[in-house]
Image (cartoon, rainbow, N blue to C red):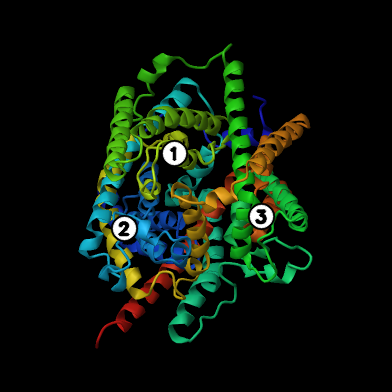
Amino acid sequence: MKEDKELQEFRDLLKPPTHFEEGFDWKTVVGAVFIGFLMMPGSMYLQLVIGTGIGPAARWVTIILFAELARRSYSGMKQQEIFLLYYMAGAAMHTPFQGLLWNQYLVQSDAARMLGLTEFIPLWVAPSLESSALLDRTLFHSDWLIPILLLIGTQIITRIDQFGLGYALYRITSDVEKLPFPMAPVAALGTMALAETTEEREKSWKWRVFSIGGVIGLAFGGVYVLLPALSGLFLMEPIRMIPIPWVELTIQTEDWLPAVATGIQLDLGLVFIGMVLPFWAVMGGLAGLIITVVANPILYHHGILNRWHPGMRTVETVFANSFDFYLSFSIGLGLAIAAIGFWHVARSFRRSEAGARGSLRDLFRPPPGRGDFNFWISIGIYICSTLSYVLLCVWLVPNFPVAFFLIYGFIYTPVISYVTARMEGIAGQFVSLPLVREASFIAGAKYFGYQGIEIWYAPIPIHNYGSATVSFREIELTGTSIRGIIKSEIVVFPVVMIASLLFSQFIWRLAPIPSGAYPFAQELWHLQALNSLLMQTSTLEGNSLFFQALNWAYVGAGTMLGIVTYVVLTLFGLPIMLVYGMVRGLGQSMPHGLILEVVGALLGRFFFLKRYGAMWRQYAPVLLAGFSCGMGLTGMFAMGVTLILKSLGRLPY
């Protein structure tokens, strides 16, 4: 494959170390408890309020606190210890029991009632409408026992499963094929900024850049998160100087941009994200957005987007356009992207045959000290975990053909995972085939007599482990032993499960979800429920709404347009990131979040890169890490005050 200049810049940010350490000690255990019981509730709360949890901020807040405590006790923290805290914080932010809050909404939602699906949602997903568990808003009820046990079981399998095929593919693509993984250094650089001693900080740019980002995050978070949260405790309506989740402009622009969802999300974090993302990927997305803005009015005037009408806001506009056109068109674009990915992988094989940089023997001779385990153990984990998923699906959905589950787990999953692993290693791109899972469900209903919607909620063994290879590469770049990662998983899992259950219950008891107390969920959950449940009607008897929305002509048009666009852009020698960004952006793009990302990309490219030179590539991710930390601190403070005062307000005295 032709070398891309921008990708090469990302590849050269970090080189693999020669020394590895586990980094697992008492600080890791204390960190797991701190993350689970202090960071997780804040992330859950912000996810419902503004649509983004603490995310990376939880990691930076945890690292800074522990690093400063260690420094004041004259012990310090090694880079590997810091990365282990970083890794655990990321694992803890995946709050599994928050999914049950979505399930309780789904079974009670207007979307389920409108589509007539309420009675078909299985009891192992959520209790029925008549259950007192829903009326009392409590997870501590016998009707939740099976959903909770099922969730815990699948989480255990998932935690073990990440060391299966994903690790095996990492060994193949990194150790044998020596692929560069251009995007992995970006994620690894932030943690290294905090791994410096006091003396090193005085001479290093990393801590200064991180601190600048932190101050900006604190200032913006005070206005964006803290002010609405605190004012809402004492006033009838909270003071929102910056609208959440976005400024709605669709109604204002409908006369000259019919059927186009317009608005702007005024989250300063998007500017910093735009600085970090590859420039041409952002520009490709912008190009796709412009095409969408031009195309939608044309499609509307030709009667294709016929469900849109004046007065619709963003959520209604997106759903109506998706039903009329973009559901089918996006499937075609997804097929085009997948075809491009497969072609790149085949081409890279042909280019590397003459001078391969590794051999199969490297699978069994990993770098010393990295903490690797036997390659065949990872294959065994993959086989056992996949069989566990198959058995669960057979138990939960006994009338669905078993052959489908085996094909999912042992044919489709390894093929798509390997293709994605190679694309991540070569170009930092994720590859997926759209609606493979959904199409197989529909085929099971059409040709094998399956009727129902239970299959949509079953833990189907369709996974794409290719992205896991990037995580293992990040671990390697920070000099952390994989054995330390395994130990941290054992420690953090029970903490995460207990904390997630307790705080999901606590947040639900404070107010119904969604409701005015959680504005993001109130704004967008209805659209998400409509999109999800619309697809599920395809496996029921009668005239499915999904089949009404599916148009194979539009699917073909999306596939052809995606491939033609790719060919034309590559013929002109344009960067690969621009090509992928534009093809992906040809779907129903919305300007809400993209505008500030573009601003950030332009600032980074034409101002900061010129001013600071090649070092800006390293400054940007550290600056984003600092900003996330500042936002996280304000979010944690807002969450703490809100939860304490609201919980006191519920006490009888």
Local secondary structure at mark 2: helix
Q: Residue at x 30, y 44 (%)?
A: 489
Q: Which mark is residue 512?
A: none
In x, y percent, where is residue 593? 62, 58
Label 3 element class:
helix
Instruction: Give the image quarter of residue 557.
Output: top right
Which three-letter amino acid code belongs to the residue tagged 1?
Answer: Ser
Measure the alpha-carbon separation of dots 1 and 2.
21 Å
Q: Classify 10 Å Cα crowding around label 1: few (below 14), some (14-19), many (20 and above).
A: some
- Report the Cα–Cα distance between label 1 and label 3: 26 Å
Q: Amino acid at mark 3?
A: Gly
**Residue type (three-letter) at the residue carrying disc 2:** Gly
Q: Residue at x 39, y 66 (%)?
A: 108
Image spot of residue 547 (x, y percent)? 55, 48
First-in-chain label (1 vs 2) = 2
Residue 600 circle label: 3
Q: Is residue 537 left or right of residue 141?
A: right
For marks 2 and 3 on the same chain, the one whose residue lies earlier in the sequence: 2
Residue 51 in sight in this render:
yes
Residue assigned mark 2: 36
| Residue position marked by numbered label 1 in the rendering | 471
How far across and how far down the image is residue 106, in percent?
41, 61
